[in-house]
């Protein structure tokens, strides 16, 4: 039987693939070009977070799903390295967004979408200001800032292969 963490990772990957496929179908039905430019507004928070991570690290976001004690589902103990500490800060950032009531209806930050422009060193990513949203602008902008800070932090931290698929019971 699959552990809860493995099951969650599988579900996230499947949801991501479905989202990408659905977006491609919608674009084709509307006769639109599927966006590939780095300034395209990406929708779907988990995909957005993954895109930002890939943008700043040059690695697949999947490399970080079970990295260290804090990257991916859960988080406890002492971070194993700088990249893991980035994930701990991200967890705390989301916790702060939840604790302050920034998001209406107690929305889980992992499922609230946002918009950003740019990507990486060529055109650094920037979160769209809260005022540009019709609904939940402060919430969306705050979540985007958490995700952008994580991506930038991971981009400046070495990826240590020995912490990929780290046994979280060691944390």
Image (cartoon, rainbow, N blue to C red):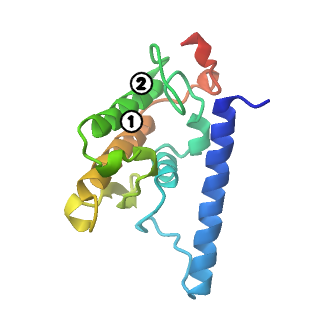
Dots 2 and 1: beta carbons under 8 Å? Answer: yes
Nearest to N terminus: mark 2 or mark 1: 2
135, above or below 140, in the image: below
- Residue on which the image places disc 2: 85
136, above or below 150, in the image: below
Which residue is outermost to the front? 105
Q: Is residue 31 left or right of residue 155?
A: right
Q: Position of residue 5 (x, y in %)?
A: 64, 31
The residue sitting at 62% across, 54% down in the picture is: 15
Q: Position of residue 169 (x, y in %)?
A: 60, 13
Q: Which one is in front, 80 or 16?
A: 16
Crowding at mark 2 (Cα within 10 Å: few <14, some 14-19, many 20+): many
Quadrant hosting residue 88:
top left
Q: Secondary structure at mark 2?
A: helix
Q: Which one is in front, 13 or 104?
A: 104
Crowding at mark 1 (Cα within 10 Å: few <14, some 14-19, many 20+): many
Query: The N terminus appears in which quarter of the rendering?
Result: top right
Quadrant hosting residue 146:
top left
Q: Is residue 64 left or right of residue 118?
A: right
123, above or below 134, in the image: above
> Which circle marks residue 153 in the picture?
1
Q: Secondary structure at mark 1?
A: helix
The residue sitting at 54% across, 30% down in the picture is: 159
Q: Is residue 113 left or right of residue 160?
A: left
Q: Position of residue 57 (x, y in %)?
A: 49, 43
The residue sitting at 56% across, 44% down in the picture is: 61
């Amino acid at each position: 039987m699959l552990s809860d963490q493995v099951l969650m990772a599988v579900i996230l990957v499947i949801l991501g693939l479905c989202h990408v496929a659905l977006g491609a179908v919608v674009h084709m039905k509307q006769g639109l070009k599927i966006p590939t430019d780095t300034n395209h507004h990406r929708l779907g928070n988990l995909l957005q977070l993954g895109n930002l991570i890939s943008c700043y690290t040059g690695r697949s976001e999947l490399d970080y799903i079970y990295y260290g004690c804090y990257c991916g589902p859960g988080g406890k103990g002492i971070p194993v390295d700088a990249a893991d500490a980035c994930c701990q800060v991200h967890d705390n950032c989301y916790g702060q967004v939840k604790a302050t009531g920034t998001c209406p209806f107690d929305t889980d930050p992992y499922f609230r979408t946002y918009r950003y422009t740019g990507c990486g060193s060529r055109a650094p990513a920037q979160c769209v200001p809260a005022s540009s949203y019709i609904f939940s602008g402060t919430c969306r902008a705050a979540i985007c800032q958490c995700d952008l800070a994580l991506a930038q932090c991971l981009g400046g931290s070495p990826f240590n292969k020995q912490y990929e698929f780290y046994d979280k019971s060691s944390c």
